Image (spheres, helix red, strand yellow):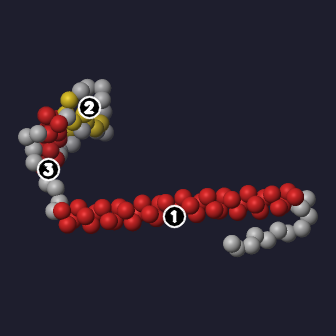
Amino acid sequence: MPVKTAFGQKRTLPRSKKKEKKRRRTERIKSGSAQPQITRSGLSPYQIPIPPLGTQREIVTQLNAECALVDANRELEKLMKKRIEVALSRLWASGLTEPVRIAAE
């Protein structure tokens, strides 16, 4: 990574050997110039560890629980938007002269 020194000279910062080795390995397996990509054939010589089936199931269970929370939040958002619309329509219908209470449903 070139940087300018106080005198305007460019020099390269030292990298750790491990980082440099990883960068060179990545450079070898990626292809393309404008939009570099890693292809299946570039990855085929490497073994990618996959967690045991039990761990995979735990991950899926956690993701499903998070998806359920997201869905619940979407439903809550719809409900709140509807309540806001009702409150605003009451305000406009009342001529904005009296306070409007939103009843909990």
Residue 42 can be seen, yes or no: yes
> Which residue is the extreme one toward the left?
45
As measured in the structure, the alpha-carbon distance from the residue carrying label 1 to the one carrying label 2 is: 39 Å
Q: Callout 2: few (<14), some (14-19), or many (20+) C-alpha neighbours within 10 Å?
A: few
Image spot of residue 83 (x, y percent): 70, 63
* Label 1 residue SS: helix
Residue at image position (85%, 57%) is 92
Give residue 39's quadrant in the image: top left
* Label 3 residue SS: loop
Image spot of residue 86 (x, y percent): 76, 60
- Answer yes or no: do the residues labelled 1 and 2 have beta carbons within 8 Å? no
> Which residue is the extreme one toward the bottom?
104
Give residue 12's quadrant in the image: top left
> Which residue is the extreme one toward the top?
33
Point out the tag, 1 or 2, that comes first from the N-terminus: 2
Nearest to the observer: residue 4 or residue 51: 51
Residue at image position (54%, 58%) is 74
User: Which mark is in front, 2 or 3?
Assistant: 3
Residue at image position (73%, 57%) is 85
Q: Is residue 95 left or right of residue 36?
A: right
Give the amino acid at mark 2: Pro
For disc 3, the marked residue is: 48
The N terminus lies in quadrant:
top left
Q: Is residue 22 left or right of residue 3?
A: left
* Label 2 residue SS: loop
Give the amino acid at mark 3: Ile
Q: Is residue 80 left or right of residue 95?
A: left
The answer to whether 31 is drawn above or below residue 85 in the figure is above
Give the amino acid at mark 1: Ala
